[in-house]
Image (spheres, rainbow, N blue to C red):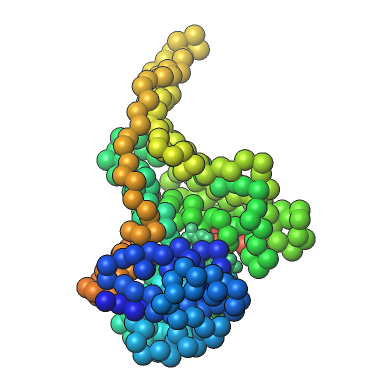
Amino acid sequence: MYNIGVIGAGYWGPNLIRNFTQLERSNVLMVSDLRPERLGYIKSLYPSVETTTDYEDIINNEEINAVAIATPVFTHKDLAIQAMEQDKHVFVEKPIAASVADTREMIELADKKGLSLMVGHTFEYNPAVIRIKEIIDSGELGEIYYINSQRLNLGLFQQDINVVWDLAPHDISIILYWLGREPKYINTIGASHINPAIQDVATLSMTFDDRLIAFVQCSWLDPNKTRKITVVGSKKMLVYDDIEANNKIWIFDKGVEKPDHYDTFAEFQYSYRYGDISIPRIDSQEPLKLELSDFIASLENGNRPKTDGRNGLRVVKILEAAQHSIDNAGKTVLI
Ligand SMILES: NC(=O)c1ccc[n+]([C@@H]2O[C@H](COP(=O)([O-])OP(=O)(O)OC[C@H]3O[C@@H](n4cnc5c(N)ncnc54)[C@H](O)[C@@H]3O)[C@@H](O)[C@H]2O)c1
């Protein structure tokens, strides 16, 4: 049985606490938050869990094997480093840290100490996302031309990070997982409307080493909640709608082809294909449960979890480049 300490019991932390409590091989021993009312809430749900407003009580507790961090992004690195210095394995929410330099420091310490360091890129454990990777890898869609991801809603406005750092980690981690490679360069534009210093809408364009391109549009200022990713291939097209309760993946046998040879303009005609639509069946398992099981498995067998520190670094590299591009009016930034 692994004893877990959870730091941060705001919006997301309780989901970690619930899942670690439900897993067979883990147990939540202590929870820390700066806000006593959040600790009161946790105590009302889990009376046997100890609570503290001082995270050092968790980090210095010898019975605790691993620390899960669900605090604001700018605190991730210091909390993770302090926990690892006390030989705790660390699970940290996305994005893993606020900069590439911070992330590298975390990875180095985890490697040096032989500890597990994992980032909560939940969607890489989502059965629908895993199914789509299998579909892409099987070649069913053909050559991937482009991916378009939209993550839009009204709120939740953050005070310390912009919409790119808040929402895009999900889309970036999904896209890198599907494609198995990193983009060559990125252009990002964004604008602030509510809080002058914090962009609330942005669009990232990631260009890969061939004609493949991926767009991520994120917004806290949209009337509709949208979580939709379109993958367009040379053979078929796929739409993943995470808002749909059951039919999350739609595969369209649609496409367009140019004639190989033509002599006159009259002979030239694109051929469009409007074929069948198929909807693959997906298991309905909670992604967070699968994710935290992988973390516990990494403690048991010493293997790296799927979304380890390096996986977190790949995403932060793109976030940092996107920020640089936004700050320079959409300039091209090499990854
Ligand atoms: N994987 C996902 O789908 C998902 C979803 C939402 C949030 N998140 C991530 O979870 C993290 C937290 O987000 P949130 O929305 O829960 O934020 P939140 O502001 O609701 O909660 C953060 C909590 O951390 C506490 N805190 C801050 N510093 C602390 C410290 N030193 N010691 C103890 N407690 C401290 C705050 O009091 C607050 O209650 C972020 O990294 C966010 O990106 C992930």
Q: What's the residue at 44%, 36% (across, down)? A: 239
Image x and y of residue 13, in percent = 49, 67
Q: Quadrant of residue 91?
A: bottom left
Q: What's the residue at 43%, 13% (across, down)? A: 263
Q: Which of 48 and 4 is in front in this view?
A: 48
Image x and y of residue 167, in percent = 56, 56
From this viewpoint, which residue is outermost toward the top? 266
Image x and y of residue 240, in percent = 44, 39
Q: Quadrant of the N terminus?
A: bottom left
Q: Is residue 274 something that shows in the picture?
A: yes
User: Please, is residue 325 above or below residue 247 in the view?
Assistant: below
Locate residue 53 relative to residue 140 in the image: left or right: right
Locate residue 92 relative to residue 196 in the image: left or right: left
Locate residue 77 relative to residue 24 in the image: left or right: right
User: Please, is residue 292 above or below residue 112 in the view?
Assistant: above
Number of marks present in the image shown: 0
Question: Where in the image, quadrant-wise, is ligand 1 located?
Answer: bottom right
Q: What's the residue at 59%, 78% (across, down)? A: 36
